[in-house]
Image (tube, rainbow, N blue to C red):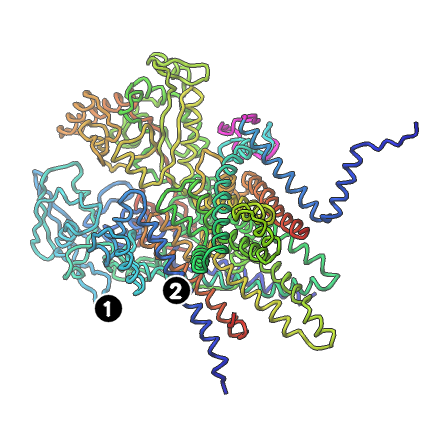
Amino acid sequence: MINIAVLKPIASAISRELFHSITLLLLLSFFVFFLLYNAPGDEVFQRYLESHSELNSYDSHNLFYIYFIWLSACVTGNFGTSMVNGLPVLGQIIENLGNSILLIFHALLISVPFVIINIAMGFKNNFKLISTTVSVILSILAVVPIFWLSYVAIYITSTRFDYLPVGISPESLSYLEMLLPVALLSIGSGVLIHITQHTKSELFRVLKEDYVLYARAKGAKVYKHVLKEGIIFPMLHLMSHQVAYLFSTCIIIEQIFNWPGIGRLLWQATQDRDIPLLLGAVLATAFTIRLTQFLSKLTYIILNPRASHE
Amino acid sequence: MSKINIPRWNHKFMSLIENVKIIGIRNSIYLSYSSIIILVLIFGYFVSYFEYLPFDPEDLDLDYILSPPLTDGHILGTDYLGRDTFSRLILGIEAYLVPSIVAVIIAIFWGIITAVASIFTHKRVTRTLSMINDSILAMPKLVLLFLVIAIFDPNIFYIMIVIGISNIPSVAQLLTAKIDLLKERSFIDSAIASGISYHSIILKHILWSNCRVILFSQSAFIMGEAILMEASLSYLGFGVQEPTPSWGNMVQSGSNYLLQGDLWSSTIPALAIMLVLSAFYLLSYTVSRVLERRH
Amino acid sequence: MKRKKTLFLVLSGFITLFTFSHASNNSLQYGETQKPDTLDPYTSNETTSLRISQLIFNGLVGINDKQEIVSELANSWEISNDSTEYTFHLRNNVFWHPYNGVKQKFTARDVAQTISIITHPKTQSNRKALFEHIAEVYVIDEYTIRFTLEKIGLNDLARFSFKILPAHLFTERQYLKKSNSFAHNPIGTGPYLYSEISNKENVVLTANSDYYLGEPKLKTISLKPFADKNVMNKALSFNALDMVINVSPRHIADLKSDKRFSLTPVNTLSYSFFAYNNNNPHLAKQKVRKALSLSLNREQMLNAFFGNRGTLISGPFPPGSWAYNLDVIPDQYNPEKAQTLLIEAGYKKKQNKYFSDERGNTLSFKLKVPIDNNNESTKRVILAYKNFLKKIGIKVNVDFMERKAWHKAVFKEHNFDITLTSWSFDDASDITTLFHSRFNGPWENNFISFNNKKIDSLIEMGSTTLDFEEKRTINHEIHKLLAEESPYTFLWSLLNYTAYNKKFKDVTIHPYKTFDNVQLWRSE
């Protein structure tokens, strides 16, 4: 028997989040459009309008008017056609975005066992040294330019192991081929060490909370609670907040490892000044990032219904 | 004459040890490491400003291409055009310091304004500001940079402005959290009661006395990030353009030869970036930890 | 211990499996630096697109790797005595690639339709000029077509190498745009037919079993775009690629030492140069331009940057062309003479080691160049140039610009002092538009506003004469004059290299199309 009274705050929290996300995306799309509108030289904006099937009939320069027409086209999935190859932008974005998400998802996924092992090692005195060393090495690797790191990695694998992890497409996907890009993405961007450190400190904070100490003193089992409060929730939160950062790093990783993701698309569009494609890709990226944050909030609320009252 | 004369340096030495004890050995190692690196940076800036360089950084020597360190007076070797890496590294400091200060100023200034405005004004303003901050956070920094590069131009100052803007939310969030805590404290109330103006309460008592740690550590962090961003952009072809040396384009041009086995010309600037960045990040981390604990 | 060993074996087995699984038999994968915009031969101007469309389409005639005209879709042809009428007899065994499962026959109607499609005002194409000289088209019967020309040019027959489009796909629309589905799913008569774009990246072509010269021996050819040139080169040596079209100079030495690859030099009719804008009062002086040319050590640059893979040139024609005058010797590096010339031209050297004019202003020029991330050699040449001029006392400010902005500034607005660029020629080696003072408007080729009465009259003389020997003498004279005038600093004509795995046999590399007689290529 589901209690409606319990569901109500959850539903209201979700709708609040949804409203927040939508407003945010609207704001962002306006900002992007505004930037384009103010591009130096009339040509950039004018050429963009001419390339768009819904906008080329309007020659009014009223910002808000054009923005709303553009927005309604975007909502229906019409981002225009690319200036370079004449194909609809949306189709290109969807395929490439999928490939990027694959990479980012795995980069986040491998951090889970890593964090758990690292934390577990930190508790045992014999392994403390190893865990500290690993952390130090990871922090150092996070502050060198990622493309240099990737080149070095490729250099090592190709000369030492006689294996080149590039020139692959996601179709013939095997985990071995993905290993290097994914590992570099999570190490080189510093996301791995960030998640590890923060989860660790959060866990220690929870363990030192009065109620936990009290419960442990009384002999009650608190593992489940500590796991939830100290590891799962902070990791969920951290991961969803690192997605934007991973997208940044992904651009470079995709470039080097020849991965046909959204980063390649963004780069190519910037190179060619292909404004419709660039705009579409930027909005799609922002949308994905907001969506992951929304989903993580959703999971949080469902796992922890009390939080919906906040 | 049996007066015991304790030398003055001994006093200083003792107080140094005292300080180390207070801060903790690990933190003092961090701090001294970062201050040494930053001093070297500042020294390098002046050296390049007065042009006391061992070689002309733009002078090509086509007979010494990609030579390893310590060949014929080139302490750190030469790059793909036979230019002296050491001189270029020093000159490259200039390419960062001024622009990255622009980024820092923008982030700190607007961060403060946003934080103060969101605390001391109407709730609706607060909500709007947090919405704007969130929307900046939903945009990957490199993507934002691409947008600006495509619409405007790949210019280092534009790039730094964008890095500055994209760091406003993090500064603002930290400040807001801190000021929120401070607001509850009694000294604010007593300051208001004793008739001190709001301006001086916000500027002097809140920002300067209590938040300067956050601002300082954030500045170091943004400086570090600016270096890393510029390096990434250099790889993608949108960074500082040659012949002006920047560490990013030095690593980039060197790494063209890395897969063929010429490691030096990219590794040296990459190591320089690593050293400086770790100094900035450690400074940011240690300062906030040490000084926060003292409060 | 034993178990460990087995595990290791299995793992290394996996690794080798993955490494070599890409190179399946009977297929060729070639690397490019970007993906093609479109796959048809007209809408895009990118070399990537043009190269792959060569595999899918045919012209009436073709040009082989030795620059000779060979028959393609036309079996034979007749040219009337006054060279204004061309009659082509077409092959009757040519089929279009299947469209919706149906194979249509290729006829004269397709040829006529192609011309009307490309000359349609709504068609997006940079190659419309190819058709300007055609006055009338007559379809005589299914396999015979006749053209009359408006005016006679040099080597008119070569112009009929334009690619033929299928008329049956253009029944509704009479024009071609980038957004047409045809531009992305092309139907042609060529040896390979478009199969798919796997994951939006690799373009896969499969052998056309009905090709009129017999079924190609390689089953598939695919294009693989690489964003990073260094990685592309590495992929070649790891068998993840079979062919790299344009090997960048820094990788040549590496590949040369590798026995597995064949490195074919491709001589293109092109050269690079520094152009001097005559609107700048200093650069309008011949002595200044000559001094600039003399102060460069081009030999050392060619050696250090390109490993001597190219030839220094002395004049406005590509070396190897019939118009090139071998008697003119390229300028030698001579900084002393350069300085004397500058002093003769009225400049004085100040204490700060830079030259200055009568009014005491330092002699300095603005060098505008496009940013080209993939082409590091341009950057090297620019920086070396700046350095050489600094040595003799001329200041150069380098301005790296975004490519489109550079194009506009240089070719439209003529707002530059010096720039580095290159020309590519067809075998007519016509330089009229480059140096005749008539062609100095916006978007025209004499962007340096070069104006010399003698050159103008020589060029006009050359274009009116029909006698080939006379034409050659005139061109040699022009060459000599321009070498003295130095409107450009002529640099070099570089060899491009194409590298491919030696397991492929019977490979002939075409200078700009790359794929020549591709139906004969085979792998071991």
Element at badge 2?
helix
Q: Is residue C131 visible?
A: yes
List the residue tagged with mark 2: A22
Give above or below for C79 relative to B90: below
Q: Is residue C219 visible?
A: no
Horizontal side of residue C31 vs B31, given as left or right: left
Quarter of the figure with residue A222: bottom right
Which residue is at the front of the view, B241 or C388?
A: B241
Which residue is at the front of the view, C130 or A141?
A: A141
Quarter of the figure with residue B239: top left
- Tell me where residue A62 appears, x and y as whole percent: 25, 52
Indicate the amino acid at tag 2. Answer: Ile
Tell me which secondary structure the magenta stretch mostly adopts.
loop
Residue most extreme to the front:
B194
Residue contact between numbered discs 1 and 2, judged by CB atoms under 8 Å: no
Indicate the amino acid at tag 1. Answer: Gly
At x 23%, y 59%, the residue is A54
Horizontal side of residue C500 vs B221, given as left or right: left
The stretch of residues the image draws in magenta is B50-70
Horizontal side of residue C79 vs B204, given as left or right: left
- Tell me where residue A79 appears, x and y as whole percent: 30, 59
Q: CA distance from mark 1 to mark 2?
A: 47 Å
List the residue tagged with mark 1: C101
Give above or below for C142 relative to B246: below
Residue most extreme to the right:
B2
The circle on residue B181 is none
Element at badge 1?
loop
Identify the subunit bearing mark 2: A
- Tell me where residue B37 appears, x and y as whole percent: 62, 39
